[in-house]
Amino acid sequence: MSQNAYLNRCITILANELFKNRYHYADFYQEKIRTACELFFGSSDVQTETLKDTLLKKIGINIITLLWELNNGKEAVYEKLTKYLRESLDEAGIPYSKKEVDEAASAIADILIVLLVDYTDYAITGIEHSEGLGQAHFPYIYLAWMQSMDVNYNADAEVFMTNGSYRTVIINCPVDVDVYDDDDNLVAQIISDIPQDVGSSIRSGINRDGEKIVTLPAMGSYTVRLTATGSGSMTYSITEYNPRGGGYSRILNYYEIPIMAGMTFSSDIPAYSAADLDNNYLKWSSTQYSLSHDGVVLTADADLTGKEATEAWYMVDAEADNTDHGLVMGGGIRQPGNFALVSAYAYQGFEFDGWYMDDVKISSDSEYRFLVRNDVTLTAKFTPSQVLGEDEQSDDSDDNTDNSDDNRNDGSNDSIAPEQSDDTAGRWIKQDGKWWYQKHDNTYPYSCWMMINGKWYLFDAEGWMKTDWVQTADGLWYYLDQINGDMKTGWILLDSKWYFLDDINGDMKIGWIQTNNGKAVSTVTPDHYKANENGEWIP
């Protein structure tokens, strides 16, 4: 994405979701942003650079912390940003009052929150590339400032350059995409949802909602060929971007066309006419787009232009029923024809129940993707689960689950890495009925034992917590609680049979301990009991 496209997109997001309109901006943000500008640009160049660099560094280092702080509400983020701004001002040697810091931090926090919640990649990109973005656009910033101060400035003055328009093709369905120019050269390709490098300047990709995207210049003609790789339905959209309006001025949609694997479609994307390209006041083109199947031209379900297209957007609100139970992402603005992907992540002690709309459950998938047709509010509900903690530990003496020898994971022979030190700062996460552990540094253990809060757990090669009987590569057997996953020691009763597990190492004292004949029958335990070749207690 170019800097111009990135900034246009960020400004559109903030305008629609934060500032909303000139009255809302004047009432709630104008004074705060003026205060922030005074703090940043009202001192020497050295102080300004020191303030900017220090604050961005603090935000960048703590970006994950700020994201998680949102679970505690906006006030928690305001508090953090106020602290970072005050420290940065002190380091830059810029004087300030409490009111100035509070107002500036509030404005910065609101802008950051909008981007962090649903456009995290935009927030991180802006922080990481702030220096380049600022230097590249200083001329435009100064020009905009002068224009805002000049009462004689005319926004409709003639512009002597190309109109800068382009088209975006958006495809939602299981298809492969091939794009050809008017010389039949392959200029873009998406195969199995993976954009291919075909040596062209035409950009294609998959956005955060799982939509296939191809961006095409207005001065070129293209053919988009689609081949269905599965059955279902296809939603196909063509949008025109108008740089003067800072948004899309035309939206052409084909909704939910039934498809089957092997079906092919062809879409013609002609170039703008010479008159359209020369028209610097163009709001939308007169181009005739088409989509066909087996030579039959399909009729579009909607062709929005002008203000109808510019104002055609829906708000997707995705929220958790309780922010202490889980994290929800994916809300934000969508256009007609867009799909939205919302995601829910349960915190330790809870599991995702489902997505609800007006108290009606519409999906049990933690990642839910759907065609946006109107404003929608989705609530992710979480329910208490079997938490890996003291209060929920099961009583082994009452465990009658069938865990006999026939149910042991014979042949698993997990390759186990050296044991790791105790961890108390991470959290358990349950997905698809399985548990994994997120450490304090956001990494996770895999192919290893790990002590967590004083108990040993075993993780497979993909990081999932293992349960039940497990035989490791060294031939030893261990029993991991079927609910909590922690390694058991001492005598345990399973399927009406007693088994003895080493008090320290947890390995089962059975005939698998190698002797001359490969088995040690009637092993004597430290409590002076015996276990036969199956590890069972001999009364």
Image (cartoon, rainbow, N blue to C red):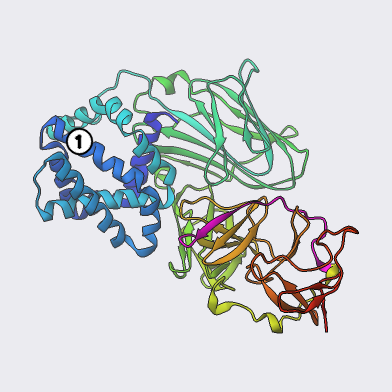
Q: Residue 126 is drawn in which quadrant? A: top left
* Residue 20 can be seen, yes or no: no
Q: Residue 515 is drawn in which quadrant? A: bottom right
In depth, the one of 40 and 189 nearer the eye is: 40
Residue 254: x and y in percent read 60, 43
In depth, the one of 343 and 521 nearer the eye is: 521
Residue at position x 49%, y 40% from top?
A: 251
Q: Residues within 10 Å of mark 1 (few under 14, many from 20)?
A: some
- Magenta stretch, overall SS: loop
Q: Residue 429 is drawn in which quadrant? A: bottom right
Residue at position x 43%, y 67% from top?
A: 323
Total numbered labels: 1
Residue 371: x and y in percent read 57, 52
269 vs 261: above or below: above
Give the SS element for disc 1: helix
Residue at position x 23%, y 25% from top?
A: 139
Which residue bears the numbered disc 1?
50
Asked whether 128 falls inside the magenta stretch, the response is no
Residues in magenta? 407-426
* Residue 186 can be seen, yes or no: yes
Q: Is residue 504 left or right of residue 532?
A: left
Asked whether 409 falls inside the magenta stretch, the response is yes
> Residue lying furthest top in this view?
183
Q: Is residue 174 left or right of residue 166?
A: right
Q: Is residue 295 left or right of residue 249?
A: right
239 vs 397: above or below: above
364 vs 7: above or below: below
Residue 250: x and y in percent read 46, 38
Given the image, on which type of amino acid does mark 1 rest? Thr
